[in-house]
Image (spheres, rainbow, N blue to C red):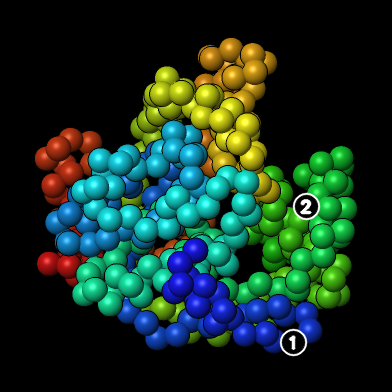
Amino acid sequence: MGRLARAAAAGLFHGAPYVRRWRCVERKADLRVLLGVTASGKSALALAVAERAGAEVVSMDSMLVYRGMDIGTAKPSREERARVVHHAMDVVEPSAVFTVQDWLACAEAALTEIAARGRRALVVGGTAFYYKALVHGLFEGPDVDPALRASLEQRYDAEGSSSLHAELARVDAPAAARIHAHDRKRVVRALEVWHQSGRSLSDWQREWGWDGTGARERERRVVELVREEAELERRIVLRTREMLDAGWADEAARVRASGGFSATSSQALGYRTALRLHDGELDRDAACAEIALGTRQFARRQRTWFRKFHEAVRVRAPETTQDLAERVGEVLRAFDWS
């Protein structure tokens, strides 16, 4: 992480005993954000928009930060990144834990540097939690208790997702309503806060304004790229096949052999299945079907999140080269980048 990113991280102040750090959103340059679910085509549209607008891309994807995880994350190619400068990509090795706090520091540093050079910044991605943190600021909660977290993770794996999600519903119904039972990381974190502080995560968030009731939101113009569900599913299957053909299984094995996956990088879609394919536990068709199913389920969760972002202008994804030019114009107008 660069000097500005480290400085941004150091700018987080320490609060009450059970609040480790709270990052307020200061008045900064307005944001331009392009949202889209996985496989929607947002990267191609972002590239075209950035070229027309003279902008640089700041990635808002939790998995593009990892070096060497290129095929399975659909990372923009070297040629694409030569056409438009991209930030918040290839930041750490897959063996490193990279949190939303790390990404926020990295993104803020990039936005500052881009603005200092008189350039435009286009934030692009589908990680809704990162978007929420960028716009509203970040509430982190108590310091991590490794023993407690390990205990909750073991229970989650042993008892099943529904058991811990039901426990969360009893102590923090608002959190349970917005966190999917299969979202292991966030279910565990919400329960962790409850056990450590005796208060629910939702209570802490309301007190500090993270839920949007009292936070100073950052000014932004937002576009969401949308596709019909049937077309998105077709694209997911096609993209999965292409990724496997490009050597995804070998890429996953290289990561495993050169330090392995961290607790955060291991959450990347499809890599566990790609390893099973590499190890001969699955054939290619079964691996493709399993990855495509997981990707479809993830895209549905993303859409659920995006529906809450009422500020977003919905733009239909392009199907042809002519469509692309028209959609670029729509996005530029929505961004007031005429």
Q: In the image, which is nearer the foreground, mark 2 or mark 1? A: 1
**Tag 1: amino acid:** Ala
Q: Is 187 positioned to the left or the right of 87 in the image?
A: right
* Quarter placement of the C terminus: bottom left
- Residue for point 69% across, 53% down: 185
Who's the residue at 17% across and 54% down the image? Answer: 51
Residue 29 coordinates in the image, percent (x, y): 32, 79
Could you tell me residue 137's position as x and y percent?
53, 76
Task: Give 250 or 195, whichever is nearer the viewer.
Answer: 250
The label shown at residue 209 is none
In the rendering, at what x and y percent does residue 200 appear? 77, 72
Dividing the picture into quadrants, the one containing residue 237 is: top left
Secondary element at image label 2? helix
Evaluate whether residue 66 shows in this view.
Answer: yes
User: Left or right of 97: which side holds 309?
Assistant: left
Query: Could you say whether the residue bearing mark 1 is in a helix, strand or loop?
Result: loop
**Residue drawn at 29 percent across, 66 percent down:** 121
Q: Determine whether, in the image, residue 85 is placed left or right of residue 40.
A: left
| Residue 201 or residue 170, whichever sits in front | 201
Is residue 41 among the parts visible in the rendering? no
The residue labelled by disc 1 is 16
How many residues crowd around disc 2 within 10 Å: few (fewer than 14), some, or many (20 or more)? many
Q: List x then y, in percent, for residue 166.
A: 81, 53
Vertical position of residue 123 compared to residue 11: above or below: above
Q: Which mark is residue 165?
A: 2
Instruction: Specify few, some or many for label 1: CA neighbours under 10 Å numbering under 14, 14-19, or 20 or more.
Output: few
Left or right: residue 98 versus residue 334 is: right
- Residue 94: image quadrant is top right
